[in-house]
Image (spheres, rainbow, N blue to C red):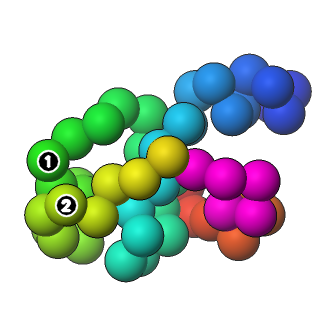
């Protein structure tokens, strides 16, 4: 996948479990924590899970 398209598809990340997320939600669907969804940075894309 092209990196620009990849970053547009997954603009958010869970700060607890480092899972990339495509929509801003109240909680992370991976780990279930509330309030951990933040805007992803460049470094986040290198170390994140999908």
Q: Earlier in the sequence, mark 2 or mark 1?
A: 1
Q: Position of residue 6 (x, y in %)?
A: 71, 32
Left or right, 31 with reference to 42 = left
Contact flag, marks 2 and 1 (Cβ < 8 Å): yes
Left or right, 34 with reference to 9 = left
For image coordinates 77% across by 53% down, the residue present is 42
Q: Is residue 30 visible?
A: no
In the image, residue 22 above or below residue 18: above
For image coordinates 33% across by 55% down, the residue present is 37
Q: Is residue 9 visible?
A: yes
Q: Main secondary structure of the magenta part?
A: helix
Task: Quadrant for residue 43, please give it.
Answer: bottom right
Q: Residues within 10 Å of mark 2 (few under 14, many from 20)?
A: few
Residue at image mark 1: 26
Residue at image mark 2: 35
Q: Is residue 43 magenta?
A: yes
Q: Position of residue 7 (x, y in %)?
A: 69, 34
| Nearer to me, 34 or 19 | 34
- Magenta stretch: give its range: 40-44
């Amino acid at each position: 996948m092209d990196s620009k398209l990849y970053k547009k598809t997954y603009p958010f990340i869970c700060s607890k479990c480092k899972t990339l997320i495509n929509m801003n939600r109240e909680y992370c669907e991976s780990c279930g924590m509330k309030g951990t969804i933040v805007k992803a940075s460049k470094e986040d894309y290198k170390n994140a899970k999908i």
